Image (cartoon, grey):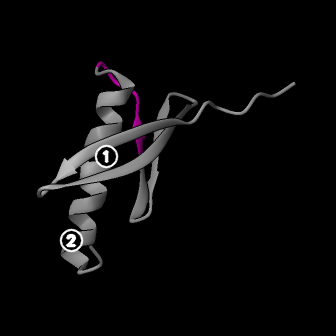
Amino acid sequence: MTTSPIREEVEIEFEGKNYKGSYTIKSKMVHVTSAHGSKSTQVGASPPDLIARMLLRNILSDAKGKGTL
């Protein structure tokens, strides 16, 4: 029986506003999704929640660069 990965919430402040997303960990990868996009990276030495916050910040920075934020 296969179980679905547990989805955790992540929230950060970016340029004075709070933004939320969620993340899952599957096959040693952290996957973050938000209203502004998604990104994934390998789990390393840092805690997954810290990695998720960094990925969310990258998503928001990319969205700002594209003019969609």
Residue occupied by mark 2: 64
In the displayed structure image, the side of residue 8 where residue 36 appears, left or right: left
Q: Position of residue 39 (x, y in %)?
A: 41, 52
In the displayed structure image, the side of residue 63 where residue 17 appears, left or right: left
In the displayed structure image, the side of residue 69 where residue 34 appears, left or right: right
Q: Position of residue 61 (x, y in %)?
A: 20, 62
- What amino acid type is highlighted by mark number 1? Leu
Q: Residue furthest front?
A: 17
* For marks 1 and 2 on the same chain, the one whose residue lies earlier in the sequence: 1
Residue occupied by mark 1: 55
Query: Which stretch is magenta?
Result: 40-45
Gap between marks 1 and 2, in whole Å? 14 Å
Secondary structure state at the residue bearing disc 1: helix
Q: Residues within 10 Å of mark 2 (few under 14, many from 20)?
A: few
- What amino acid type is highlighted by mark number 2? Lys
- Residue at screen point 87% across, 24% down: 1
Q: Residues within 10 Å of mark 1 (few under 14, many from 20)?
A: many
